[in-house]
Image (cartoon, grey):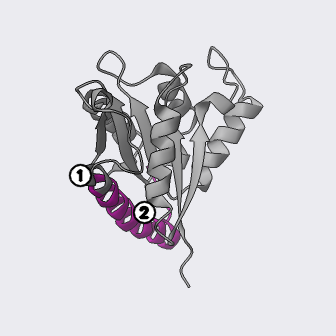
């Protein structure tokens, strides 16, 4: 029996009243339909990150880095703020380094009209610099059309299924590759 792929779904917004937790809930419901996946939600609001980068990692930084290290793959749920992604997400990403390497990253993005794709484009650049592999397809949600619900469009569910299929393929392939030969950057 194969070990399920461990996916960390990271909620990238820390704003009060954010849509990220509801979007994440919808997406994790889609992922729960796959028996070969184990999903963990990593909510940045649950980490007490310092305002500036400390000389030594804090307990919250170490806990976040452990979550990243445990995962085989990631889905970043991100809003688009001013054609980019939130600063707390960048801060959290920067706390880990080796833990992202040779692992796939997928995106569920949301915004008004843009569906968050500007944020995803910038995140692809960041994760490429960290030697992570971003998957091609994205789930993009236009909040002006409403937040996803169990009754959401077939297109949105199909997008989530495609993203999960790509993440599964890359996640298993890269997990096997890391086990056979550790990644060196």
Expressed as whole percent of the image width and height from the top left, the position of residue 91 reads: 53, 25
Q: Circle 1 sits on which residue?
A: 155
Q: Residue furthest bottom?
A: 1
Residue at 46%, 72% in the rendered image: 176
108 and 151: which one is in front?
151
Expressed as whole percent of the image width and height from the top left, the position of residue 57 reads: 71, 30
- Disc ID at residue 49: none
82 and 60: which one is in front?
82
> Could you tell me if residue 183 is visible in this image?
no
Compared to residue 157, the image places residue 56 above or below, namely above
Compared to residue 142, the image places residue 99 above or below, namely below
Compared to residue 43, the image places residue 38 above or below, namely below
Image marks 2 and 1: residues in contact by CB distance under 8 Å: no
Expressed as whole percent of the image width and height from the top left, the position of residue 12 reads: 49, 32
Residue at 61%, 55% in the rendered image: 70
Q: Is residue 62 left or right of residue 162?
A: right
Q: Is residue 179 magenta?
A: yes
What span is in magenta?
158-185
Expressed as whole percent of the image width and height from the top left, the position of residue 179 reads: 52, 70
Which of the two labelled residues, at mark 2 and mark 1, occupies the earlier sequence position?
1
Q: Identify the element where label 2 is drawn.
A: helix
Q: Is residue 119 magenta?
A: no
How many numbered marks appear?
Answer: 2
Mark nearest the camera among 2 and 1 is 1
**Neighbour class for label 1 at 10 Å: few (<14), some, many (≥20)?**
few
Q: Circle 2 sits on which residue?
A: 171
Q: Identify the element where label 1 is drawn.
A: helix
> Could you tell me if residue 170 is visible in this image?
yes
């Amino acid at each position: 029996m194969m070990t399920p792929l461990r996916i960390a779904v990271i909620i990238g917004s820390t704003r009060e009243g954010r849509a990220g937790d509801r979007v994440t809930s919808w997406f994790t419901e889609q992922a729960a339909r796959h028996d070969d996946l184990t999903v963990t939600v990593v909510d940045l609001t649950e980490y007490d990150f310092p305002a500036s980068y400390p000389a030594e990692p804090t307990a919250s930084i170490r806990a976040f880095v452990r979550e990243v290290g445990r995962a085989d793959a990631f889905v970043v749920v991100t809003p688009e703020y001013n054609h980019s992604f939130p600063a707390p997400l960048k801060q959290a990403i920067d706390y880990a380094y080796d833990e992202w390497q040779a692992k796939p990253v997928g995106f569920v993005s949301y915004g008004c009209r843009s569906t968050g794709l500007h944020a995803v484009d910038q995140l692809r650049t960041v994760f490429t610099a960290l030697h992570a592999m971003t998957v091609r397809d994205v789930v993009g949600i236009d909040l002006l059309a409403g937040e996803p619900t169990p009754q959401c469009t077939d297109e949105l569910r199909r997008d989530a299924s495609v993203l999960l299929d790509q993440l599964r393929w890359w996640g298993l392939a890269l997990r096997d590759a890391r086990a056979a030969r550790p990644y060196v950057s």
